[in-house]
Amino acid sequence: MMLFGHPNANTNVREAALALLEQDLLAEFHTGLDTTALVDRAPARLRGELARRAFDTRLSARIRTHAGPEVVRLALERQRLLRYDSHGGRWSIQRRFEAIDGAVARRLDAVAGLLGVYMYEDGAAASFAAARERGLTRLYDLPIGYWRASVRILGEEAELQPAWASTMQALADPPEKLERKDTEIALASRVVVASAFTRSTLAEVPGAESLDVTVVPYGVPEPWMGPREASRGPLRVLYVGGLSQRKGISYLFDAMRALGAAATLTVIGRPADRENRALRDALAGTTWIESLPNAVILEQMRQHDVVVLPSLFEGFGLVLAEAMSQGTPFIATDHTGGPELVGDASGDAAPGWIVPIRSVDAIADRLQRLADSPEARAASSAAALARAAELPWSVHRASLGRFARDSLATV
């Protein structure tokens, strides 16, 4: 049996918890909020928000919540009394990770038959140290690339695009946070990542040759079975994600300018820096929506012809899998999980296309091909749905479950 912990209900976290449960390995799942019982009882206007922190009911008996600080943080953020803080303030995301980490560490002697812990980056140092003392297996889930590679790539970007530098918050991570990341990796028995790109960044870990790293790509939501209207007129382009230059968004804005009236752009996401002038100016020429419930985002995907994620540094990019499930192809860089999702497909009738980072021309060229050909839009939409059917979350859970069980047997 294993203890599992993460402060949020991200899709990949929910699926990982289910993967352990389906292997009969999940003893307890420690998290911040569990709104599962509230979703159906809440007013309609609140259900979308509550659904973001709800879980599969099969997990209910295993979930242990630590809700107090998370409720306060969310309330302060909603009232704009607290700015988003990932670095270490009292109400920061980092403090929530540390709280879950500490809670798991304190449970190690209380759970009978415990064999290991499964924890995430920024929230594993205490539980891993305590687990190692007890001879327990430590599985480390790294959802995004290793920090030294991030500093290198984003540092280069800050020099290339200084007007966008303030949106790359990872460059401001304090030394103690970075040291904690290295401590966690050093304590891990095995590491699991979702993309070949994330695995490649681990080559920059001191002592990388001793790491045991396994790639288990994320799954794709169930394909949309309803109708999609035929696409005519200007190409409808969609971006979903944080508004940060880590996501390479300036290159998308530049590509859209190159297409002119041949395409329109909708942007869904919160700014990393609301005061950044370059970002404000770029958004002025788009349809910008700060936040939407996931169900509405999926609907937006169905109403667009292509999703673009030009990230410089990504772990996977679940938005790509979601887009594919709605019959919407994507353009993404090779610094995402896009290559895993596209597979061997190529040409105009592919479920997605991979471009180099920082390439306005490559993004614009692919957008122009779609803008010029309604037939290509229809063919790539069909390809996206077909590929989505090949990569359900159940495949991810089975692979991750085997990884966990094999780790307990061999480490």
Image (tube, rainbow, N blue to C red):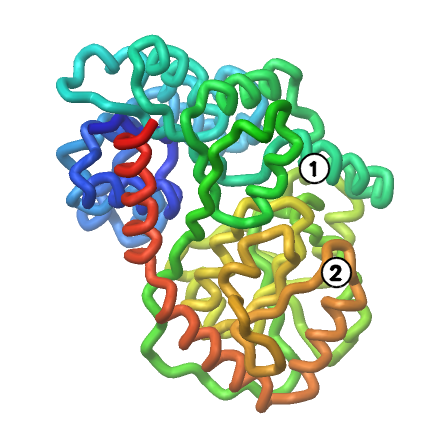
Q: Earlier in the sequence, mark 2 or mark 1?
A: 1
Q: Secondary structure at mark 1?
A: loop
Residue located 75% across and 40% down the image: 276
**Left or right relative to 140: residue 180:** right
The relative height of residue 177 versus residue 37 in the rendered view (above or below) is above
As shown in the figure, which amino acid type bears the numbered disc 2? Phe
Residue located 53% across and 17% down the image: 183
- Where, by quadrant of the figure, is residue 207 drawn? top right
Q: In 3D space, how far apart are the residues under numbered discs 2 and 1 (Cα atoms)?
A: 17 Å
Which mark is on residue 253? 2
Please give the residue where the numbered disc 1 appears in the rendered image: 168
Q: Nearer the viewer, residue 276 or 182?
A: 182
Q: Secondary structure at mark 2?
A: helix
Q: Where residue 113 appears, x then y in whole percent?
A: 15, 21
Residue located 31% across and 25% down the image: 117
Q: Does the rendering let one see residue 138?
A: yes
Q: Nearer the viewer, residue 32 or 22?
A: 22
Query: Given contact means CB atoms under 8 Å apart, are the residues at marks 2 and 1 in contact?
Result: no
The relative height of residue 388 versus residue 60 in the rendered view (above or below) is below
Q: Where residue 405 appears, x then y in whole percent?
A: 26, 37
Q: Where residue 14 appears, x then y in whole percent?
A: 31, 43
Q: Does the rendering let one see residue 78?
A: no
Which mark is on residue 105? none
**Left or right relative to 100: residue 89:** right
How many numbered marks does the figure carry? 2
- Where, by quadrant of the figure, is residue 263 drawn? bottom right
In the rendered image, the quadrant that contains the N terminus is top left
Are there few (<14), some (14-19), or many (20+) residues within 10 Å of tag 2?
Answer: some
Residue located 64% across and 47% down the image: 243
In the rendered image, the quadrant that contains the C terminus is top left
The relative height of residue 69 versus residue 235 in the rendered view (above or below) is above
